[in-house]
Amino acid sequence: MIDNVLAAAALLTTPILLAAIGGLINRLGGIVNLGLEGMMLTGAYVALAASSATQSWPVALLAALIAGGVVGYLFSLAVTRLQANEIVAGVGLNVATAGLIGFILKDYYHSSGTIRLPDVVMLPRIVIPGMAQIPIVGAILSGKDPLTWLSWALVPITAFVLSRTRAGLRLRAAGAAPEAARALGLDPLAIRDASTAVAGALAGLAGAQLSIGVVGVFSVGISGGRAFIALAAFYFGRNRPGLTAAGAALFGLFDAIQIYLQGRGVAPELMQMLPYIVVLVVLTAIGLAERRRRLLQGA
Amino acid sequence: MTAATTGVVRTSRFDWAALVAAFAPFVVALIVGAILLAATGRNPLAVYGLMLREGFGGESRIAATLTAATPILFTAIATAISFRAGIFNVGVEGVFSLGGLAGAVAGFTLTALPSPLLILAELAVGALVGALWLAAPALLRARLEVDEVVSTLMLNFVAVNLTLYLVNGPFLAPGSANSATPMIAEAGWLPRIAPPSTLSLAFVMALVFLALYALWDRLTPLGFEARLNGLNPRFSRAIGIDAPRLILKVMIISGAIGGLAGSAHALGVTHRFVVGFSPGYGWTGLAVALMGRNSAIGMLLGAIVFGALASAGTTVQLFSDIPLEIVDVLQGVVTIFAVVRFGRLLRGRRAA
């Protein structure tokens, strides 16, 4: 039973983690991205369509990555060049992309919700010989798709790039001190747009994991608010890749437990509340700690 | 200089530039929609003509549009109150659902009350729940400096899941297949003001609150303090405005109106609480408040246009092969571009 829940949790964490890393990079660049959900949905649809058309999962992933990145970039232009409000524009983007994809589904596929396409090639499962026999670790690591491995590989890579490389420093400068960045001859808006494109690309991959990694169909509700859980994960992680990943894994585990407990007398809605409550508790605790520090310093 | 800044200097003159700016997002949305419609082999002008007729053609269609505009107008007012004070409160979406559920629960439990009292009780319960809900992020912001955008956003997801839990559990109508509460007692429904249409007293209430909002905004000390705090928090602190108290008051009022909005919607339109009670009314209201630059007339116009989109969309799908989703595309694009300044493109590149 524990193995089943952990195996499910590992799979459920992947899209949250990918989108959370994207959201983290975007936020460091200066944009809080509520439109990740729309980018995830776009990636999910494009991955399935591309996989069906080409029968190649790498091509499908590339297509989802590009589609998410393009949507992210366009969204970013509205925010950085036209001063759209990032919060409400993100919400609007989610409505618009869901509407557009729903429109395509009805008009082109004559389906009002779910589509199955012929010849879809799913993401392969990577099986490491002997791994499955190891308790707990085996359940988490065995038979996972490439995106799950990629998402975890991205955690140290992101941490390294952000703290140790020129690109990471420029990204943080563009987000935290755009004026200073400009004085150094950088273009903070272009950097910000690039960070949104990266976030969109990662959200696109997250969507691909949902459509061609797990179920092999696409439905308009497939992203199901996962980008918002990712948002909770990056608020939980407060700009730190490691903590953000821990948040994503925790919320993935909540999701797996919730699915396991369905029909066992625990309401799924109460479990689904947990990520957001955890974030509120963390923020409150930080606020209290800082107030106490201020009071001690004042005394 | 923003429209809000100039608004303080000359509150009496009508701001034409702001009006033009407010219509820009609709123009962009119509262009995007036209491309989509043309690409799928339809005549955009014919579709828009049909939508215009379905939105405004005749008494019953106008009544349907105003019915759809009512919750949007309410949530816009609730949001604008906190925006005025410089609080970016995005929590009205969650409060709307909570208020709707609370009003519905009062409506099927307090059935011993006579009609006017029952309606008052339902509305009061909705407002109370909303006020309490938003008092929490207000306290977090005022006492612990917790960013209200994050807290109210997170609280929305808590609120939606909480109402889902309650409507699937303790308040589920017995024998009901879909997730809904029992019907509100008929004595607790808001009366219809233009039968046979569904337009109810809720619309009149929204107009009254809009007028009260305009008065609050321009004539009351709290409205003035809110505006000062919104424009320049440091100045307002320097002249002795108690920001934490102001935040708390404004958020409580915002929550009360947001909750009232939900219960009025339950009492006037749905007559129960169902899953999917709010298809994003709070977010649309937020966009309308931004688009109308928190002005009463701007919000009224914005709410009516969004209401027309919603009411036209549902019937357009019935009479043609156009997917209902076209409305989501239009509405989403309007929302994305709600506050953009196209002037910046014309004036050339400026620093951000």
Image (spheres, grey):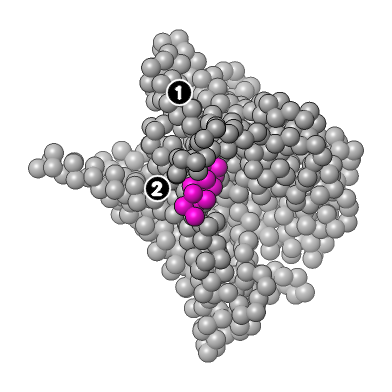
Q: Which amino acid does the dot numbered 1 rest on? A: Ile
For the record, the magenta segment spans A1-12
Judge the density around disc 2: few (<14), some (14-19), many (≥20) Cα neighbours within 10 Å.
many
The number of numbered badges drawn on the structure is 2
Query: Which secondary structure type mostly characterizes the magenta part of the structure?
Result: helix
Query: Given the image, what chain letter belongs to the residue carrying mark 2?
Result: A
Residue B186 or residue B4, whichever sits in front: B186
Give me the disc on residue A279.
Answer: 2
Q: Quadrant of the C terminus of chain A?
A: top left
Q: Are marks 2 and 1 in contact (CB under 8 Å)?
A: no
Q: Callout 2: helix, strand or loop?
A: helix
**Chain of the residue under the numbered disc 1 shown in the image:** A
Horizontal and vertical percent position of residue B264: 58, 69
Residue under circle 1? A157
Q: Residue furthest left?
A: A299
As displayed, is residue B266 above or below residue A34? below
Question: Which one is earlier in the sequence, the residue at label 2 or at label 1?
Answer: 1
Among the 4 quarters of the image, the one containing residue A65? top right
In this picture, residue A238 sits left or right of residue A200: left
x, y percent for residue A122 = 70, 36
Which element type, helix, strand or loop, lies under badge 1?
Answer: helix
Q: Amino acid type of disc 2?
A: Val
Q: Position of residue B345 (x, y in %)?
A: 62, 23
- Direction from residue A157 to residue B211 in the image, left or right: right
- Calculate the distance from the C-alpha at mark 2 to the C-alpha at mark 1: 25 Å
Residue beneath the point at 47% across and 13% down: A186
Residue A6 lies in the magenta stretch: yes
In the rendered image, residue B30 lying in the magenta stretch gets the answer no
Q: Nearer the viewer, residue B88 or B60?
A: B88
- Label 1 Cα crowd, 10 Å radius (few <14 / some 14-19 / many 20+): few
- Residue at x 75% of width, y 57% of height: B311
**Residue in view at x 71 percent, y 42 percent:** A216
